Amino acid sequence: MTDLTRRPGKSRPRLSPEERREQILRAAGPRFAEHGYSGTDVQDIADDIGVGKGTIYRHFATKETLFLATVQRAVESLSEHVALKVEPLPDPLDKLKGSVHAYLEFFDACPGVVELFIQERAAFGTEAQPLYFAHRDRERAKWQPLFDELVARGDLRPLAFRDMADTIGDALYGAAFAHRLTGGRCSLAERADAILDVILNGILKPGDRAAE
Amino acid sequence: MTDLTRRPGKSRPRLSPEERREQILRAAGPRFAEHGYSGTDVQDIADDIGVGKGTIYRHFATKETLFLATVQRAVESLSEHVALKVEPLPDPLDKLKGSVHAYLEFFDACPGVVELFIQERAAFGTEAQPLYFAHRDRERAKWQPLFDELVARGDLRPLAFRDMADTIGDALYGAAFAHRLTGGRCSLAERADAILDVILNGILKPGDRAAE
Amino acid sequence: MTDLTRRPGKSRPRLSPEERREQILRAAGPRFAEHGYSGTDVQDIADDIGVGKGTIYRHFATKETLFLATVQRAVESLSEHVALKVEPLPDPLDKLKGSVHAYLEFFDACPGVVELFIQERAAFGTEAQPLYFAHRDRERAKWQPLFDELVARGDLRPLAFRDMADTIGDALYGAAFAHRLTGGRCSLAERADAILDVILNGILKPGDRAAE
Amino acid sequence: MTDLTRRPGKSRPRLSPEERREQILRAAGPRFAEHGYSGTDVQDIADDIGVGKGTIYRHFATKETLFLATVQRAVESLSEHVALKVEPLPDPLDKLKGSVHAYLEFFDACPGVVELFIQERAAFGTEAQPLYFAHRDRERAKWQPLFDELVARGDLRPLAFRDMADTIGDALYGAAFAHRLTGGRCSLAERADAILDVILNGILKPGDRAAE
DNA sequence: TATGAATGAGCTTTCATTCAT
DNA sequence: CATGAATGAAAGCTCATTCAT
């Protein structure tokens, strides 16, 4: 009875709440990344997907809520991307190397995520721990057994897990930031091996190892 | 009718332009670091040093100009701090190690500088290269001879200078950011040796070096 | 595909239009009284009775219509309450006294009605005469014969009906408002006798009557 | 040296803070009275006096603050008007009568004040006691000695002060409201004598006094 | 030169009303 | 009939910047 032909004109698609939410987040990400938190008018996001401003506010209580959901989504994407690449690898050392590559690849694919991380801190200041670091804290625990195994196996030097994990994490985080913020020409993926080499082998010549 | 005698107590100190400029920058730094760029009212800075808002605008054309001068000042402080610590050291390897310590010490002393870097990017977006990275680009050239000498001497592995410099730079930058953004408890200085150890020696056990 | 059997538990009661209308008005009264006209969201009223917002709009064309119906209902309640109390009394003077008591009792029982009267004026301004006063104008005519009879009987001084009626009406209206707006502790009913005493006998000592 | 001729064009008068405040309040009163609290855009008031919206907000922190200052000003005007009329009268009974006349005259002169009182209650609800009643509470104490003296002199019946004062106050307040809300044609001043007559002498014929 | 009152564009959020389902 | 997602006009408040004094 009801016409099955979609009138392309006025008929609003009537998305499900989940679809709408997802649609909004997809539009919000690039806006916030490119124009910043305060530089983005909620109206802009609404216009991008052709809905009224009220529709945004039906799904996200405040601009802040929307923004944080956008960041959270990015953090989860990063996490999933790394997990997906690493899981199938059987060898722990390969997992470690693979995670470095995956991490850097992610930021090649989604360079705006760096901006989101910056915007979060810029907008919400000293109060809360940024979502990325909250997530990193949680994730670190998962890596401990892997490092332990590598040390036990004699692959890694018996350094404190925390020192290794933090230093590697900071190096990658720093690389992703620096790459984005300097407008780095070559891809991060191309730098991955060089970074891994330093992390794994250090820059000193083996004979000098006693030096430090 | 009104008394014409200037009470010396009330007579404004009449700072020289340079002094005033410096005074303003000193007040602006903490404000911008703590409340962010858009969260800081120019009036707040004026109030902090007890002058009218117009006075700020006499010395800095716009809020943006003032902010960037504040960041520039911080970048120069960092640079000077590192240079001061490194210069007296005669040995190139000591210079390298010393610069890592000095860099991290600086952010222990001036943690707000991280916020300034974040705010700059957040406020001015994708257009310009942040002052810190512009400065880092310029500084890198100064380090090349030192690395070359260390490689020539056989202290360092013959890696590409750029790879080493970027990786080290990113690791330190990442460490400073992560430390501030996670509310790191211990000082950065305490982490310096562990970071240096990874950078210099890597995390792999020497025997495994072929692995990479 | 969707089940066509209506589970009887979930089947909405399907109120008759009149019942629905009444249900809506019952919910609207307290909302408007407590939160004011603009402070009340039509959604709130819908939520209170567990229907969709559209249902409200099916029964009342606009929020304004709904609000005015709510006020009208209150005015009629007041009128009925007084009439019910006064009608059985045979003596005109008792009717007069009884109406004062009934009027004040009503506002003890329904204190929110004062708020409705205030809200009506506040929201719709100078244009229209408020429903309460429109009603009072209409009612006054019914009291004229009673006052005439009391004057004729020699119970009342031969004052102009309008002056008496207005003054009494204003005194009661003022008392109800003042009581609500000051958060009066004792009940209005308790003040009824004192008010009646002043209205009936005045505050002057009889001997001084010439004074005025 | 500075030109003393006022250029009528762009030269902003540069009012003193007090003058500006007063100017704003003078403009706000009629606006709020005519269009209500929520019906008045702060921009409207700004336009009325030819200033920017920011200027309003420089002098009043919020729209609410501005509104309440407007009401407070009206309450004080009323109070002053009554005091001014009553003070010179030597006889206490004349003071009482005079205050009734002055009160009603005030609302003839400033009928919008009724709207302000209504708007205050409508906008700020049940929480706070309206400024008018707060003021009335404070003022009542001043009248007690006068009533006591009149009772002692034998002019007034020995009724409870509170009952007399409240009943009179409510009658006048009610009269002012009813007059405004019914669009009363004749002036309140013309009704003053009739109201006073009821208050002073009651409506009963003297012989019936035992009736109540 | 210093001041701070004035400006007004800009942005977030609300909510009466509509209408496709 | 009932629903509730969608709309979009509207209004409060901020603050960088200007400029008369």
Image (cartoon, coloured by chain):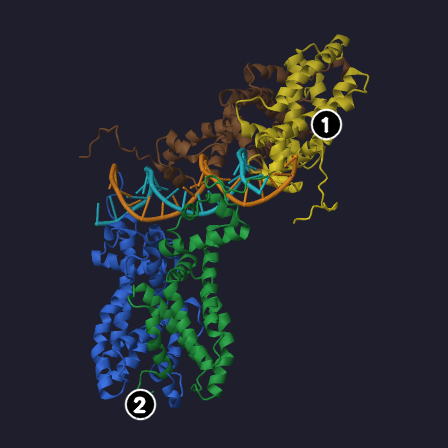
Chain colours: A green, B blue, C yellow, D brown, E cyan, F orange
On the image, the x and y values in percent for residue A150 come to 47, 84
Task: Judge the density around disc 2: few (<14), some (14-19), many (≥20) Cα neighbours within 10 Å.
Answer: few
Splitting the image into 4 quarters, where does residue D197 fall?
top right
The C terminus of chain D sits in image quarter: top right
Residue tagged 1 = C192
- Would you place residue B123 above or below residue B187 in this image? above
Callout 1: residue from which chain? C
Q: From the viewer's perspective, is B15 left or right of A171?
A: left
Residue furthest to the left in view is D1
Does residue A79 lie above or below C67 as drawn?
Answer: below
Q: Quadrant of residue B179?
A: bottom left
Q: Nearer the viewer, residue C121 or C72?
A: C72
Q: In the picture provided, is B64 more to the left or to the right than A72?
A: left
Residue under label 2:
A208
Residue A120 x, y percent position in the rendering? 42, 59
Q: Position of residue B78 (x, y in %)?
A: 29, 69
- Which chain is home to disc 2? A
Q: Is residue B110 left or right of residue A165?
A: left
Q: Are marks 1 and 2 in contact (CB under 8 Å)?
A: no
Q: Quadrant of residue C11?
A: top right
Residue B145 at least partly seen = yes
* B185 relative to D147, above or below: below
- Type of the residue with mark 2: Asp
* Viewport quadrant of the N terminus of chain D: top left
Q: Disc 1 marks which amino acid? A: Ala
Q: Nearer the viewer, mark 1 or mark 2?
A: 2
Give the number of the disc on residue D162: none
**Do tags 1 and 2 sit on the same chain?**
no
Nearest the viewer among C201 and C93 is: C93
